[in-house]
Amino acid sequence: MDNRINENRKKIRLLRTQMLETEAAIRGQIGRDEDSTGTSLALMAMRAEMSELSKERARLGDDKEPILVERLMRPRRAPAVRLILASKRHLARKQKISS
């Protein structure tokens, strides 16, 4: 039983990594204005498989501790900084109040 749980956890971890890579590929295809139908269908099949694995995991009684996957992807872009806009608004309010 414990061996089946470990195998299930390994499959889930591998599938999550593959899903992240596939999602990145889809974003790249969309960015290049290419057809991403095949890749999207593969991702949907992976999601269906993940659903089955998670149901099996719950049946085996291993749904208490999380399965961690190291994020291999870097963020797509840095968070926007809005300090300039906030200071302009603040200055505009000051000018209205002092007028």
Image (cartoon, rainbow, N blue to C red):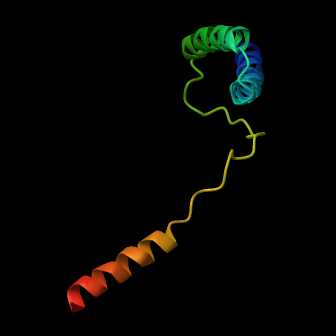
Quadrant (top left, top right, bottom left, bottom right) of the N terminus: top right
Q: Is residue 83 left or right of residue 54?
A: left
Q: Quadrant of residue 97?
A: bottom left
Observer-nearest of 5 and 14: 14
> Which residue is situated farthest in the front direction here?
99
What is the x, y in percent for residue 3?
77, 16
The residue located at (76%, 25%) in the rendering is 25
Image label count:
0
Specify the quadrant that holds the C terminus: bottom left
Residue 80, quarter of the rendered image: bottom right
Q: Position of residue 9 (x, y in %)?
A: 71, 22
Residue drawn at point x = 72 percent, y = 13 percent:
39
99, above or below 52, in the image: below
Residue displayed at 56% across by 24% down = 63
Horizontal side of residue 58 vs 11, given as left or right: left
Q: Is residue 54 left or right of residue 27?
A: left
Check the image and report above or below for 56 versus 29.
Answer: above
Residue found 71% across the figure and 10% down from its top? 42
* Nearest to the observer: residue 89 or residue 46: 89
In the image, residue 95 above or below residue 3: below
Which residue is nearer to you in this view: 29 or 11? 29
> Residue 35 location in percent, x, y?
71, 14
Q: Nearer the viewer, residue 22 or 15?
A: 22
Q: Residue 48 appears at what percent x and percent y? A: 60, 8
